Image (cartoon, rainbow, N blue to C red):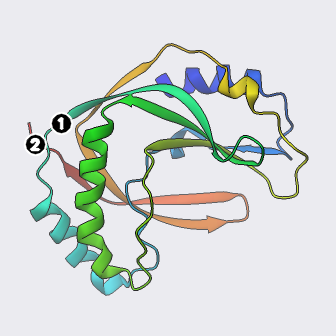
Amino acid sequence: SQIKSILSEIKFTLHYKSSVIKWIPVENIHLTLSFLGDISNNNISDLIKLVENNIFISKFQIRISKTGVFPSVKSPKVLWLGLDRGIDQIKILQNQIEELVKKFNKNYEKKLFIPHITVAKIKKGSPKVDVLPLLNSVYSPIEIEVNYISMYQSQLFRDGAQYTLMNTFPLTD
């Protein structure tokens, strides 16, 4: 619900139709630590056990406080919220997850990890979107305690992604 208030403010700064910007439904907003790609159903239980037995990081706080775009301001495709606290812990956790899951992904490719929360995507073929109002938007930072991570299966459909919770992994106290 805290992110919902930021989204309302951000949407207000960008006056574009839904045919140009696709906003991510609040219930689907998340921070991706690792994208696993296609993994055989036979390997999912092994992957879950591996993560359960090898992730040892304490609960921590993140603070969402900024906005950004990928890949660039001149050619934005993704609108996101960024962190200014908890980045080191997120990167450690992400690195641990990547080391565990890469053996399950035949097409694994190490990519630069920039912790962010995608809030919208600009549709292909849309006219140029002026993202400066988004980048200049100011909102009260949100503090969130990270006390677990979740593994989701995502399926892409014409109207967006559908996520199914596969497992939750509590972080230590």
In percent of width and height, residue 143 lies at: 36, 22
Give the position of the C terminus as an image quadrant. Answer: top left
Residue drawn at the location 91% of the way across and 47% of the way down: 127
Q: Measured from the top left, where is residue 58 in percent x and y? A: 13, 40
Q: Which residue is mark 1?
A: 59
Amino acid type assigned to the residue bearing label 1 in the image: Lys
* Residue 6 shows in this picture: yes
- 24 or 111: which is nearer to us? 111
Instruction: Tell me whether circle 2 and circle 1 mark residues in contact (CB < 8 Å).
Output: yes
Between the C-alphas of marks 2 and 1, the distance is: 6 Å
In this rendering, the answer to whether 156 lies above or below 59 is below
The label number, if any, that marks residue 172 in the structure image: 2
Secondary structure beneath label 2: loop
Mark 1 neighbour density, 10 Å: few (under 14) some (14–19) many (20 or more) = some
Q: Disc 2 or 1, which lies upstream in sequence?
A: 1
Image spot of residue 116 (x, y percent): 48, 42
Q: Residue 87: name its quadrant.
A: top left
Would you identify the image quadrant in which residue 145 lies? top left
Is residue 98 rendered to the left or right of residue 84? Answer: left
In the displayed structure, 47 sits above or below 150; it is below
Q: Tell me what residue is drawn at x 31 percent, y 80 percent.
A: 104
Task: Write the residue at 78% across / 43% down.
Answer: 74
- Residue 1 appearing in the image: no
Out of 74 and 95, give the one closest to the viewer.
74
Find numbered disc 1 in the image and state the secondary structure of the residue it sits on.
Answer: loop
Q: Is residue 54 left or right of residue 21?
A: left
Callout 2 amino acid: Thr
